[in-house]
Amino acid sequence: MLGTGLLLYMLSKEIYVINHETFAAASIGAVIIYSIKKFGPSVAAFADKINEDKVSEAQEVKDQAMGSLAQGIEDEKKEQWRVEGRHMLFDAKRNNVAMLLETNYRERLHMVTNEVKKRLDYQVELQNLHRRMELEHMVNWVEQSVIKSITPQQVQGMWSLH
């Protein structure tokens, strides 16, 4: 009603005058409407197919991006787990180094103990040698003194006993 009333008002007040352009516009409008009715569904289907292809390509790209990002997240979680395990590894390495240092210390201590024992044994042997030499010297001295004190008469008496 509004459209019809507005059209009649414009025609009666001669705001819009009907001429050859009006008929051309009406025929062009009729051809456009006919084309839309005749070819509209097939064109719409073709446009929908193109749109669906673009949407599916975009979805594939999105899925690939999501997959790569999910893989990146998993890789990052794995690296964080490795970093957490690194503390245990460093503790184990620190303990190994401490054990190696303790082993080296004990080996050096054992070596020092053996060297000190060798030197002490040497000193003991040296003292024993001095005692033996003194004893031999005393025995030799006593023998020489005894031999010097023996008179030739005592020597003849000893030979006669044999």
Image: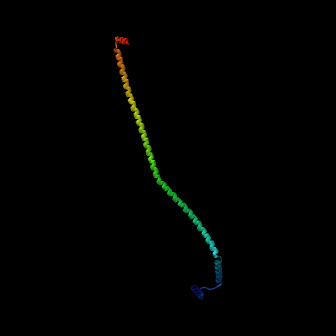
> Residue 114 in the image: x percent, y percent?
41, 35
How many numbered marks does the figure carry? 0
Closer-to-camera residue (16/64)? 64
Q: Would you place residue 42 above or below residue 73 in this image? A: below
Task: Give me the residue at 41% from left, 34% from top.
Answer: 115
Quadrant position of residue 50: bottom right
Check the picture and name the quadrant holding the C terminus. Answer: top left
Residue name at image x 63 percent, y 73 percent: 45
- Give the image quarter of residue 145: top left
Residue 8 in the image: above or below residue 132: below
The residue lying toward the viewer, choosing from 58 and 122, is 122
Seen from the viewer's position, the closer of residues 16 and 117 is: 117
Q: Residue furthest bottom?
A: 12
Q: Quadrant of the N terminus?
A: bottom right
Position in image of residue 117 (x %, y %): 40, 34
| Residue 59 appears left or right of 129 | right
Most distant residue in the front direction: 162
- Colour theme: rainbow
Q: Position of residue 97 (x, y in %)?
A: 45, 45
